[in-house]
Amino acid sequence: MPDLPRFLLLHGAFHVGTAWDGVIAALAETGFAAEAITFPGHGRSVGRAGVAFADYEDALIAALDRQPRPVILVGHSAAGVVMQAAAPRSPDKVAAAVFHNAFILEHDRSMIESIPPDGAAAAAPDNSLAVDAGFVAQVLMAGADAAAIDRTLAELVPQPFGYYTHRVDTRPFAAMTCPRYVLLAADDASLPREAWLAMAGHLGDYKLFEMPGGHEALYTDPESLARALAAIARDFDAS
């Protein structure tokens, strides 16, 4: 029996790799192996001032290059952008790309054009953006119970601002031949459904999978997210 596809999971802005722990555990129960990385500048006691977009790219390439075989690459939220930028540098290690409620840029655009100007203006002396607890509770985790919100907020970290200002050349990713999937948590209150699908249109051909839940489904319902990823893996395996 052939090995099941393996996942490499990428966290979004303000997050760390442990955000995926519940999903990894749920995937393991169905036989799928997965790992998550933490990007530079995303620890509790790390410097953020000098962290640039290139550091995210290098971290992803290093993670891909150490994989024994091609993986299904999954990016949540802002991680969609570094996937677009860096995956083409290690194409033989990317079996498929999954964008989970992820930002997907047009060519030569940056993340700064996708966040509110007042958020950009809040950059701290160490060139980071602070966690907005109200936005997390009321938008990203709308409807979640207080305990879940508190657990999530305890894990979130300031976001290096350098990630937002880099203009991404998306042409190499557009030339990749790996299958593209969009996994949309349909109850995400951070953007209208139409906005997520409009960004997905920048991918060209892709297959859409949907699941219930909000932007932080990896915290609020990791089991459903794992089931959706497993369904994508089975679809990929059958293609």
Image (spheres, rainbow, N blue to C red):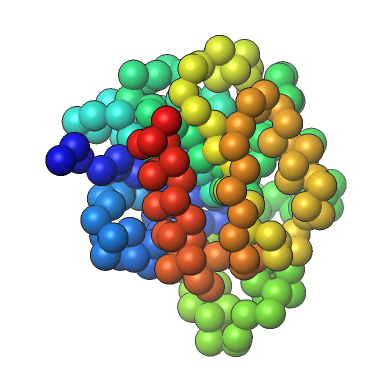
Measuring 44% from the left and 41% from the top, which residue is drawn there? 235
Across and down, in percent, residue 111 comes to 70, 37
Please name whichever residue, 90 or 56, is drawn nearer the observer in this view of the structure.
Answer: 90
Q: Is residue 193 above or below residue 88?
A: below
Quarter of the rendering occupied by the N terminus: top left
Across and down, in percent, residue 227 comes to 43, 60
Left or right, 229 with reference to 186: left
Left or right, 41 with reference to 143: left
Quarter of the rendering occupied by the C terminus: top left
Q: Is residue 116 above or below residue 131?
A: above
Across and down, in percent, residue 61 comes to 37, 27
Left or right, 67 with reference to 60: left
Image quadrant where residue 62 sits: top left
Image label count = 0
In the orientation shown, which residue stands out farthest toward the left? 1
Whether residue 28 is visible to the viewer of this picture, yes or no, is yes
Across and down, in percent, residue 185 comes to 63, 58
Q: Is residue 183 above or below residue 67?
A: below
Measuring 75% from the left and 64% from the top, which residue is drawn there? 189
Measuring 65% from the left and 71% from the top, which residue is drawn there? 141
Measuring 66% from the left and 41% from the top, which residue is drawn there? 103
Please name whichever residue, 107 or 51, is drawn nearer the observer in this view of the structure.
Answer: 107
Whether residue 53 is visible to the viewer of this picture, yes or no, is no
Please name whichever residue, 53 or 61, is drawn nearer the observer in this view of the structure.
Answer: 61
Q: Is residue 55 above or below residue 45?
A: above
